[in-house]
Amino acid sequence: MSKRLICGLTALMMLFVLSSCSRQTAWENDAGEWKLPEARAEYDAPDGDRISGEEGLWTLYLPGKNGLNLVAQHVTARTDLLLSERLEAVVTELLNFPSNSYVDALGGDIQLSLAGENAIEYSSGVVTVNLASSALGLSYRAFYIVSLALASTLCELDEVRCVNVLAAGQSVGLDTTGGLPMGSLVAHPGENLPVLWEQMEAKKTPLGNNAEETPLTSYLTLYYPLEDGDGVICENRTLTFEGQSATQLTLEILENLSHGAMYVTGVAQMPDLVDMMIHEPLASDLADGGKMITLSFREGAETEWMEQGVDPACLIAAICDSLTTFIPGLTGVAIRVGDKPLTALNSEYFGEIATQGGLLRRSQFSAFLMGRATVYFQRNGMLVPCEKNVDRLLADSPREQLTALIDGPGAADLAAGMESTLPEALGADDILAIALEGDTLLVNLSESFRAEIQSWGREKETLLCYSMVNTLCEGCGVKKVCFFFEGEQVDSIAGEICWSGTFDYNTGLCEDSFG
């Protein structure tokens, strides 16, 4: 092999190693080594947060004119970066889409809408849509088709795995007794609607039979308290029930909650809820037409939960969400401890939750549902993705993700050997502004941020930089990140890397790249 070819290959390898930088002229760092500076990116530093995306196509699924399947319709809309805004916009477009020569309007003659503020919840791939009370005027079959259309439309988004649909804050039964749960739905585009409805009808209790003797297998959402007491998180499970009475559904759900989560991490060690009960769950009707479940736990149950490391408010929030999301017509849950009703819950994070005549409603726990952000900490000199609990409405906010990274590892991550990649002196105020330009996220950081990077030294600089880059690229779906410090791009800070220009997601620094 010729010397010229060897030199050429060597140069190519050097360019690959420095792939995040487009270099121009050489400069000398503090260690006396010559390096190439980054070609400065042609962006202005952001002044304030601006994260709206560009216009794009949304796919909506509506019932076709032939009544046999859901038909795709496309609309042009803003593709906002925040998922919470996108979900509400997509659902609003779907509910308001008019009939045409191909599809019928969703709900037919009944005008459907969302049930006020916070009508859409999202956490861990699960969306729960709360429709206004007008949806209760639909037939069972029509409500099921509306729910399938919502699930098929929302599951077009990469972040969504399944969908729950409520009306006026409660699950809707799909039979004449109002007792057949629909459960969590996945996408069914192109499938035969009459066949899907027949499959649902086959689950209902035959006329004249006892619901307690009709088994049911259903896909549903379970909610779990987080181990640090700052809310609840959810996952999906397929469960089989011996019967369809509210008591049977409740006991099976409580039994599975007691076994703990199978997929999500960071949840509390669950107590045996069924073993702690002194009576079977009691279902009763309410004056407003809904019903409630009363759960009676033995004396001292709250103390036992706390001694086991479970926050009582978060535990009851998880129970209430799990039951009301699935059991038809269930408005809320009443809790008794010993011979006394629980009249209030006190939470370190959420304050006091008062019962309404002894009843705890699902809407009271809306703030408890948390989202997850993937942030990159370090272990043994490599980057490791870790899940952190964040405000569910801001789970994909770049500011929220950087703040979670700055906050550092939680107790479980520390126990697993994780270390922070950023200096402790930094705070959320050091993030001055963030803006989206095409596929590049522009991040303006404070002078204090730059000084802290410099004080940490060159050995930590690469992991520090790419922990931010990987966190933002994975969590926000962007391809590149460009940094500014007090509105200016800089070349050298600690001397290890060049900070001007743009940075790509770096897999080579991740622990699993060698696994």
Image (tube, rainbow, N blue to C red):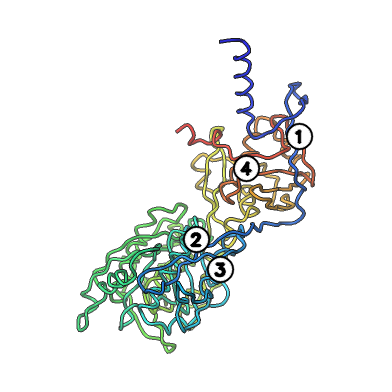
Q: Residue at x 44, y 56 (%)?
A: 268
284 relative position to 475: left or right: left
Secondary element under disc 2, as helix, strand or loop, is strand
- The amino acid type found where label 4 is placed reads Val
Residue 293 seen by the camera: no
Q: Earlier in the sequence, mark 3 or mark 4?
A: 3
Q: Nearer the viewer, residue 242 or 247?
A: 242
Q: Residue 487 location in percent, x, y?
A: 79, 47
Residue contact between numbered discs 2 and 1, judged by CB atoms under 8 Å: no
Q: Amino acid at mark 1?
A: Asp
Judging by the rendered image, the residue that carries numbered circle 3 is 88
Relative to residue 41, is residue 122 depicted above or below?
below
Residue 187 visible in rendering: yes
Is 421 positioned to the left or the right of 203 in the image? Answer: right
The residue carrying mark 1 is 491
Instruction: Work out which quarter of the rendered image holds the C terminus and state it.
Output: top left
Q: Tell me the crowding category of disc 4: few under 14, some 14 to 19, or many 20 or more residues within 10 angstroms, Cα based.
A: many
Q: Which residue is mark 4?
A: 469
* Mark 3 closeness class: few <14, some 14–19, many ≥20 residues within 10 Å: some
Residue 241 screen position, x and y as percent:
27, 68
Which residue extends farthest top? 2
